[in-house]
Each structure stands twice: as structure tokens, then as C-alpha cells.
Amino acid sequence: MAKYITECKLNYFQSKKAGKIAIVTMDNGQFYNVPNTWGTEALESLNKVIDIVEKDADVKGWILTGKPFIFNVGADIMSVDTSVTRDKALEIGHVGHATFKRIMGLKIPTLAAINGAVMGGGVEVGLYHNYRTISKSPGGCDHYALPECFLGLVPGWGGTQLVTKLCGPEKAIELIITNPLNQNRMINSKKAFEMGLADKLIAPAEFMDESLALLERIITGEEKIERKAVDPKMTDELYNQTKFAIAGRVHSGALGPYRALDLIRGAGTWSLDEGFEQESQTLADMIMSEQFMCGVYSFDLTQRRAKKLPGRPPKEVKGNKIGKIGVIGAGLMASQMALLFAQRLQCPVVMKDIKQEFVDKGLAYVREQLGKSAKKGKMSAADATWMGEELITGTVTYDGFADCDFVIEAVFEEIGIKQKVFAELEAICKPECLFLTNTSSLNIAEMGKFLKDPSRVIGFHFFNPIAVLPLVEIIKTDTTSEVALATAFDLAKKIKKTPVLVKNAPGFLVNRILLAWMDGIFQCINEGAGFMQVDNAVVELGFPMSPFTLAALVGPAISLHVQETLNAAWPERFPVSEGLKNLVAKGKRGLVVFTETGVDIDPEIAAGWPQGNKKFTDEEIRQRVLERVALEVDTILKEGVVADPRDVDTGVIMGAGWPFFMGGITPYLDQKGISVKVTGKKFHPNGFLPKQEN
Amino acid sequence: MDLRDAYFVDGVRTWFGKARPDGAYWTTRADDMVTKIMRELMRRNPTVPWNEVDDSIWGATTQSGDQGTTMGRTVVFTAGLSEKVPGFSVDRMCAGGMTCQTIGSSFIKTGVADIIIAGGVEHMGHHPMGQGADPNPRIVTEKMVEPKYFNMGVTAEKLHDWLVENGEQPVTKEEADEYAYHVTKRYFKALDAGYYHKHCVDMAVFTPTGWKVADRDEQARRDTSLESIRGLRKFPFKAEGRVTAANSSGLNDGATVSLLMSGQKCKELGIKPKMKFVGAAFMGVDPSIMGWGPVPSTEKVLKNYGLKFSDLDIIELNEAFAVQAVGFMKHFGMTPPEDPRLNPYGGTIAVGHPLASSGVRLSMQLAQDFEMNPKAKYGLTTMCVGLGMGGSMLWENAVGKF
């Protein structure tokens, strides 16, 4: 049950020219940061309002709107009980359809005045009205979405049917399938208006007044709303094309988008009631599904839990102020960091490398990226120049490092070099300056062990490409100070990254899990499974990219380096792959080649990869890989590398793009019995769903 | 006609709400009310090049919170005018809006401006009188103003006594009550005839009980009778005094705006203004008899512009308290309580008095009075101001002159 119940509040306006108008306001009595939602009580209050209006013959018009900045963001998914019976789940769909359909049944003009953020069931209730106005962006309705497929559901209160009938199947697909699968992209009111989802786009200043005035004109007949007729039928071509596109995104892992596609296609031929029933049935299936539970879990993890910065020392520990930043190295990683810091913190960033040509290359990269941003209109040309020429500077000496508030190093992954850099910095930097390292594999305590003050050292590990992946691993050694830790968390937040606190252990968190995943994959290949069979079998689970694609993206040499690091720590769990060694030795950048029929394993690589002759089914491959991952997650938790399986999932979702509908990984491993099989118990013995806070 | 004369073209206001939690505007921002009437003014006058407004001048007694950030300028953005339009804010307490009109008209006459927006706003619910003020302690220690006279009601009680003590004609409670009754009666008569709907605009407001439409002044009560006014024996300002809630204006939320233009600009745009600004005067009096202010300021403006009181055909007077209206009428030889020349369609006790906005309200009513009474030539808008001041503006009917 939601904490704050959204109530439908009824008022009347006695219009001089149009008569009595019912104004229905959805409002939970809270500020906009606690948005209106649909729940049992909210639907009941809507029903009550309709009861009153239906009986009042004097009422000539109906307008439904929200509280300032918020229309309604739909059912509160945190309040959906995932342990319901199917009959109960079915009722959820039925209740919504039945309530909203009563608005359609009103014999007076009805208008939904979409004044602010609108999602899911909020979008849907609007679709039952005769007319819709929407408040112009920016400032009006800036967030419009049917995000159900993103969360492992389908729109279940009319969305798939009514959008299709109103705007046609292409736009329904875009709104219901494509956008949610595209990192839950939302549209603004301008786009919604262009798509035909609203009849009028009205400036926020007098949105409510003008919506009322429109309704008055509609009642008096002064104005008629014209819409283009659309054909709701979906061609087979569009159906197949969309199915293919969904497969490209989620493979066969996620069900929601496929089921939504069928509902959208059905809307072309079904009656409204048939369509609503199909929708209710599908919704019930999805609510009962394990994927939805994972969706809820992931949503809570990334939208709520991560924002609370789990792992940061208590508030009383203030992080240091950041007014100037040093970056050691001017390579690609270092340049990306410098760019991000300058953009987000708007403070001076000085990059140092050993040769002027390296520095120049780094600066050239930064300026090129800034130039692109300016070209795209993301910043002014003057700002791009200011950032590239004034804020970010380069040097081959330590000039300008004395007053840095922190220095982050991204030099060659070699412990001796890093120790030397830190020693040099200690001689130059002010005492409160922190030393951050972006190492992906080295021991951070080792790095700082010759310092007079090793408490200033902390790991701050980005994921490549820095601009895209939201995760940073914050790595604490036994000596890292609380202030350093607090500063690192605050820094992550300021640069809009999601931090996960990790103990100083080889491979840290995400790379270690990815390498265990790779190890499972290599095990299958080593024992005799076909290369492409393994690659396809694993990606079918719904990972964002296939193992071979990922290996090529990361680069075989880096993969091997991390593998060797892990091997040094745990030789039995992380054998160095002979095949991978061969790959690196041959200077290959990936495992596959493009052939006339598609992609295949590079014959030179296959030849250099010793294999047994065991045959695997696809299912056996997936089982092996997931078991290997489960073993590693269990070890990670036992060693206390992270505090909670939720940190593991935050890491793989934000750092590796593992899917929402698997909950990252640990919920999926629990659901499939893999954790029990491998470790004897579940990662979430009491269930993984977030506790209801009420 | 002098092309550099300043003219009143049009005026709009919100309905005035009660400044309390169940009032229409309790959860509405003052600057949103200003935005609403600005946009309504723009809608009503589509031929005006709104992006060429030379200044946007706004009065507010409290210039903080939703009446802060130099509202004259910020309304340019919130109402959707061009960034080229400058603006500023003015404080002369109750006469804030009136002062904006005086400044704006003077700007026009001297060639500083051709098109002026002059308005006033007071959300007394958000900004109770005196809140946040830090009067200089010397005012009290050196007995410049007795502290009790910071309370306007106390000055109204004092005015009753002062009139007697200073040889002016006395005003009794009964006369004040009668006046209050008559302006309320006149108000409802005018309201029902559609007088107020001509310059008041409905506004959708978000309230804790949902969206509503603020579509009426909340101060006046239709069931007010002379008996009920007389029967009220609760004297908030002086034991067994004469000033009651029934013969005073209330605490209100409201916003008003006017459009002023040079004769030349009116000609150019083919706009027919309603009245011409003749002149204005402001005068100070003893703060303890604040309500007397309109008498000397009116005498001054008449003298300065060479007119006699008898030249005035219509007077819109803002009576914060009935005693001052009756005192004013008696001083100038009018016949209380129902002299047809003064507040012919109702007064402040009925309409409400959101401080700085009231002066502009007077002007939009006077303009409408001129339209309804084409034979009327000169009119006056006048009001008292806190800490002992009066303000008076002289206007000449321009209906049919363009």
C-alpha cells in the first residue's frame, strides 16, 4: 500500500457560458517529489466521484487533472503484491479497465488536462477521455511514458488498446516497446502532442485556465476537435520487424515486449472489451512472472537504494570541498576522466603525462569531444572553449598540483610506477589532498604503502566508456580515512555516477564477476562446446551483448591482464585461458570474423584453442555459466568484498548493463535454483523484494 | 490633446480573496496571480506591441518571497513578454500601485516611455502586514510615532477622536456603519449588473481540496444588513470603540494591472484610451490619523492642477475604514453616506483591500465609470497610506476623444 493515497477531489465551476463543470483533481496532498499514483483507494475515490457526477444532470462537462507538476505516474509498482494468486492478479487489470471505462460512459464531454509528469496508469486514464490537453515542455509535462515493458510488465489498463486505436500501431510500438527498451526513455509533451496523444499543447502559465476554456467551447459547440483517422491494423511486416528489433535488445530473455507487441497487433481487430480482457490476462501472466519481481527489485535498487549512497560514512562525516583536480596520465581513460570532471564540477583540471606529445594528444581529445558537444548544442561554443582551454590544462611537470584537492591516477597498470607517482605527489600536494586510483586490477593498499599518510588513498574505478556506464567502484583499503571515503561518495554523486563500496580485493567487483562469467564460457569451450553455440546460448539469457562482443569491446589484452591478476589470487577458480593467451599473442582484437553467412569463429583462434569433445545442449551451457557466476558471487559475499547481494546487482546492472528483468543476477540465480544448487542457500533467503515502507 | 499626455487604456484584476487558509488564493503564488492578469491584459489588447513595453512597474508592500526578486522584471518572463521589456518594483504600502501609475504616467509625459504596465499585488495571506519588518528603534524612543499607530485600526479609532478635537465634523459609529452598509449594497447591485465582470478575471487555482476557479470577491457578504453591521459590538482596536470588522476593509489577496500609453502611441495603434492622467499628489499627515491622508493630498492635487473640488464628477476612494470616507465626504461638503459621486458602484469595505493593488483597482473602476457616464469630465482616485500619507490622482474622461 502506498504511503500517501492519491485522492480524486471533486469541485465544480459554474461557467457562465457552458454551465456546471466537474473539476476532478488527483492529489495525494504531498509536494511534487511524492507523485500521484494509482492504488486501490485511489481508484475507489475515482469511482465515488464518478458516482456523484453520473447522477447530476446539471453537470455539462468533466475535466480530470493533477496537482502542480504531476498528473499521475501510474500504479505504484512497489505496492504491487507479487505473491498474489492469478485470480487476484487478473482482478488488478479488470478493476482498472472497469473504473476507467466509466469515464467513457459519461454522457458529457470529458477532457484530461495532463498538466505534469504522466506514466503508466496515468497515461491510460487520460486515454479514456474524449479530449486531452497537455502542458508544454519545459516545465509542463516533461515526462510522458508507458514504462511497463521496462519493468517486466505490459500496460494493463488500456494502454496497448487505446494508444493503438488513437495513434496507430507504429506509434504504439514506439511508446510501449521501443522507448522502454531504450533505457526507459521518456518523451515530453511536445513529442506526445506530435504523436497524437493529446489534442492541444498549451503553455504551462495558464494551462488549467485554457484547458477549462477549451472544454467550455467544446460544450457550447464553439470548437470541434479534429483528429486524423488512423488505421489501427498492424502489417505482418511491422510485426516481424518489431519482433526482430526486440530480439536484438533482449533476445529471448524478456517476455513483456513480445506480449505487448501481440496486444498492439490485436488492438487492430479486437473490440475494446476483447482487447481489455486480453490485456488483463496478459497483465496477470506478467504479474505472476519472476521477471516482474526482478523488475521491481531492479527499479528499487537503481531508483531508490543507490541514491541513498549505501556505504557512505554517516552524514556527520563531511567530504572535502573540490575546487581543483589533478589527473596523472593523459591517455584515453585519463582524458575521459578530465573531461567528465570539468563538465560536472566546472573546476580546473590539470592533466600530467611524461611526454608533451602525450599531453597534447589528451588535450586534443578533450577539445574534440567538447567541440562535438558544442556542435550538438549541448553547450555553448564559448563554454566549450573555456573548458577545453582554461579549465583543462596539461603539463609534464607537477606544476599546478600543489593545491589540488584530489589527484586521480590513470597511469600504466604497474604497481611500481603507481607507487612512484604517489610518492612524488606526496612531496608536492597539500596534506589534505586525496589520492585516487582508477586501477582495474592492482592492489590499492600496496600502491599507498610507502606513503607517510596512506589514509589518503582510495580506489575510484570507472567503467569504459566513462560517459556511458553509470557505475564507479569505490575501493576502500584498511587504512582509507572516513573523510576520503565520504569525499569519494560525494564526488560520485556530483559527477552523476552510481557508487558501490568495494573492498580492496583482486578484480574488485564487476570485473571479477565478468571474468567468472567468461571462465564459465571458456570452460564449456575448453570441454568441447562450439564457439558460436556458446556465444549464442549465453546471449539468449538477455545480456546486453554476447560474450565475444564484450571480449572484443574490452580488448583481449585487458581481459587477459585481469584474468592473470585473478589467477594469481585464486589459481583454481581463475585458470588462465590458453585460448585467450593465443588470441593476445596473435594480436587479435576479437574472436570472430565476418563470413558470407554471418559471423563465425576466427579459424586461427579456433586452431589455437585446445578443446575436448564433450557435447553440450544450450541449456547445459547456460547452467554451467550461471553456476560459475553463482560460485563467484558467493565467494565475493563470504569475503566481504561487498556488504550485500544488492551491491552485486547494482554493480552488474550499472557497470555491465546486465538486465533489469534478471534483477542484475542474484534474484535470477535464486529464482532458478542455481544459488541453492551451488552454495546450498539463496542469496536472498527472505526474498529479494524491497520491504514495504508504510 | 498633447501627444505626450499619458492615458489609461485598460485595467484588469483578479477577484480579491480572503487572506486565510480557506481563501481562494491561499496556495497560489502572488506572482502567478500577477502573471494571470498580465496575460489577460495582453489577450484583451491584441493590437498592443507587447514586446515594446517600455517598463513594467509593480507595487507590493512586502517585496520578498513570491513578491520578491524584483517582480516588475520577473513578470516579464512569467507572462511571456520579450526579454527586452525592463521592470522594477515600488513600495508605498497601500499606494504602491497608485505610485506605479504616477511614475508610469510621468515617464510617458517626459518621454521616457510610451507604453507602461503599472500594477500592484498583495498576497496578505503570504505576507501579513508588518511581517519581517524591523522598524528603527529611534522611531519609538524619540517618539516619532507611537508604536500603537503601526496598527492601522488604532489610527482609525484615533481619527474619530481627532475629527472632534480639531474642529472637523465628527463621524459617529452609526455613520460609519451606514456608509459600510451602502457601499456593500452598491457593490452587489453593480456585481449583479455585470460591472465587476468587465475588469475581473477568473483564475484556476490549485487548493488543498483540488483545483477550483476563483471567480468572485470573497470579502462582501450578500446577507449584510444595516442591523447586522450595527449589531457588531466587537472592537478589536479600542475598548468600547467605533471601528469594527463590519466598517473596515478586510485582509485580502489580489492583483491588479493597468496599461498606460502616450497619446501618440494610442494614435499610432488606433487605440481608444478611457481616460487621461491629469496629475497626482502625495501628502504626509500625522501617522496616528493615517486615514485623513486623502484630504490634504486631494487639496494639493486640485491646487497644483488648477481645479476645484466641485469640478470632480466621480471619486473612487479607497476606504480602509468607513470613518475616513465619511470624514472625507463631510470635509468636502458631500452628503454621506450615499453621495452619488463617491464610490458609485461599491467600495473597499465590500471589494477588499489587498494593499498595493487597491490604487490600480480604483483607476479601472473610474475608467469604467467614465464609460458609463460620458458627461463626466474629471475624476479622482484617492487613498490613505500607512504611516500617515494620502495619495490622489486626477483623471480626465477620454471616452470618445480618440
Image: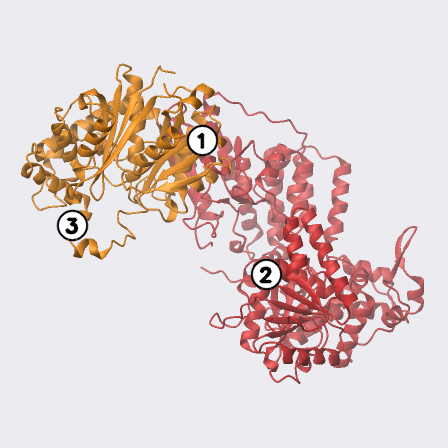
Chain colours: A red, B orange
Question: Where is the C terminus of chain A found, in terms of image quarters?
Answer: bottom left
Give the residue type at disc 1: Leu
Chain at tag 3: B
Q: Which mark is residue A651?
A: none
* Residue A94 visible, this orientation: no
Q: For the residue carrying disc 2, how many other residues have a C-alpha within 10 Å: few (<14), some (14-19), or many (20+)?
A: some
Q: Nearer the viewer, residue A519 or A57?
A: A519
- Residue in view at x 78 percent, y 64 percent: A554
Given residues A5 and B308, the one toward you in this image is B308
Separation (CA) of disc 3 from disc 2: 54 Å
Q: Chain of mark 1?
A: A
**In the rendered view, does A62 fall on the left or right side of A81?**
left
Relative side of B187 to A459, left or right: left
The numbered dot on residue B148 is 3
Q: In the shown orientation, is residue B104 left or right of residue A471?
A: left
Three-letter code, disc 2: Leu
Marks 2 and 1, Cα distance to the nearest angstrom?
44 Å
Q: Amino acid at mark 3?
A: Lys
Tell me the residue that label 2 is attached to.
A345
Tell me the residue at 66%/46% (across/down): A377
